[in-house]
Structure formats: C-alpha cells, structure tokens
Amino acid sequence: MSAGLHHLAIYNFGVHTEAYATAPVQGFALREPLNFEAATRAVGFVGRSGYPGDPGPVSWGELVFPRYLVAMGRDSGVSSLSLWDDIESLMAFAYAGVHADALKHARHWNERQAWPPLVLFWIQAGGRPSWHEAVRRFELLGDQGPTAEAFTFKSAFDAEGAPYRIDRTRVKALAAQNVERQDDLISAVKALPV
C-alpha cells in the first residue's frame, strides 16, 4: 500500500431506540464527547466531520442519511464520519478503550439493523469525503457487498484495490498505546450509566 498517499474513511450509521436526549439513550449521549476525545488522542487519527449547526469540527458538507432511514419511518439517525492513517489504527481505536465500552452497550441504545453497521473506503490524503459520498459508499456496500470501493474490517482492501490482510499484532500494539492515552477517559466512562 502507498503509505501516506491515502487515508481510510469510516462512516457508520444506526438508529437509536428513542430520541437522542431521552433517558433510554443517555448512556450514548454521555459517552459521545468522551469517544470524540479518545479519537483525537488515538494513534493514526486524522480528523472527523462535525455536524451542521453543532459546535465542534466543521461539517464535511450537508448531513444526509442512507435510504434505510425512510423504511424505518424516521427522519434522522446517528452517524459519524472520520479519517484514519490506516486500517490498523482505526481498528485499534474502535475495539479497545473508550470506544469499545460504547460498542459493548450499543444494543441498549440502538435498533437492530438489517444493513451493515459501517463502511470503510480509501480517499487521497489531504481530501475529505462529504456526507453524500459516505452515504453513497454505505449503500453500495449494502447493495453489492464488500468491494474495493466500499468494504468492512472482515473483507478489507488496500488503497490499490487488492484484498488486505489486517496486521493484528500491530492492532494490539496500537490499542495498548491508545489505552495509555485514554486512561482518564476510561475512568470517566466506567462511572457512567448505561
């Protein structure tokens, strides 16, 4: 893979069981800023899109949602869009530390879904994918399964489009570094209600 020439984008999408600010999903709402902070401390984090009208990072365009939302009779869902140096750095963040705690409890906050939870895709370094592009890739994954244009951790591709084997030893090493950087955040998360 051409190190440094590409960044890995991740877009995820889900639907909460109740409205964002309500008691049934308060555990998510309380963890969200800690997850964002943990990402900024993670090895390999490049940046994330904010949301139109919210304080924080600038939004990478108009916020849109996949077509799956309409079928559920909802007008909004929960989604995120971020960039990472590579697959291993993203995986190390996603499955360890603060974010792993959120994944452990996600079933309490989110509806069961018939679509993929996330999509991964490569972009040129220095670029930023729009929400529209992320949703297009997400729906492509749902329609066609994993391809070099839209894939998952289980069926990964490198930036040139070849199947990619994740270096799990490197993931573990990066996760250990991230956990050290998140120690205070992990303590805060453990005190939060689900």
Image: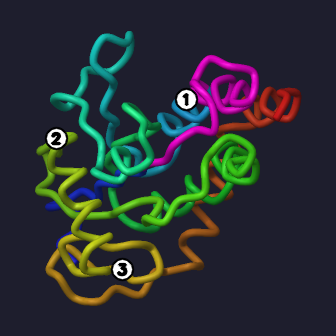
| Magenta residues (range) | 13-33
Mark 1 vs mark 3, foreground winner is: 3
Q: Earlier in the sequence, mark 1 or mark 3?
A: 1
Q: Position of residue 175 (x, y in %)?
A: 63, 58
Q: Residues within 10 Å of mark 3 (few under 14, many from 20)?
A: many
Relative to 35, is 104 on the left or the right? right
Q: Does the rendering let one see residue 11?
A: yes
Q: Quadrant of the N terminus?
A: bottom left
Question: Dot 1 lies on which element?
Answer: helix
Q: Position of residue 44 (x, y in %)?
A: 41, 51
Q: Quadrant of the C terminus?
A: top right
Residue at the spot x=47%, y=34% of the render?
A: 40
The amino acid type, in three-letter code, at marker 1 is Glu
Q: Residues within 10 Å of mark 2 (few under 14, many from 20)?
A: some
Question: Dot 2 lies on which element?
Answer: loop
The amino acid type, in three-letter code, at marker 3 is Ala
Alpha carbon distance from label 1 to label 3: 26 Å
Residue marked by disc 1? 37
120 vs 49: above or below: below
The amino acid type, in three-letter code, at marker 2 is Ser
Q: Are marks 1 and 3 in contact (CB under 8 Å)?
A: no
93 vs 33: above or below: below
Residue marked by disc 3? 156
Q: Earlier in the sequence, mark 2 or mark 1?
A: 1
How many marks are shown on the rendered structure?
Answer: 3
Q: Are marks 2 and 1 in contact (CB under 8 Å)?
A: no
Which of the two residues, 147 or 46, is positioned nearer the viewer here? 147
Q: Which mark, residue 130?
A: 2
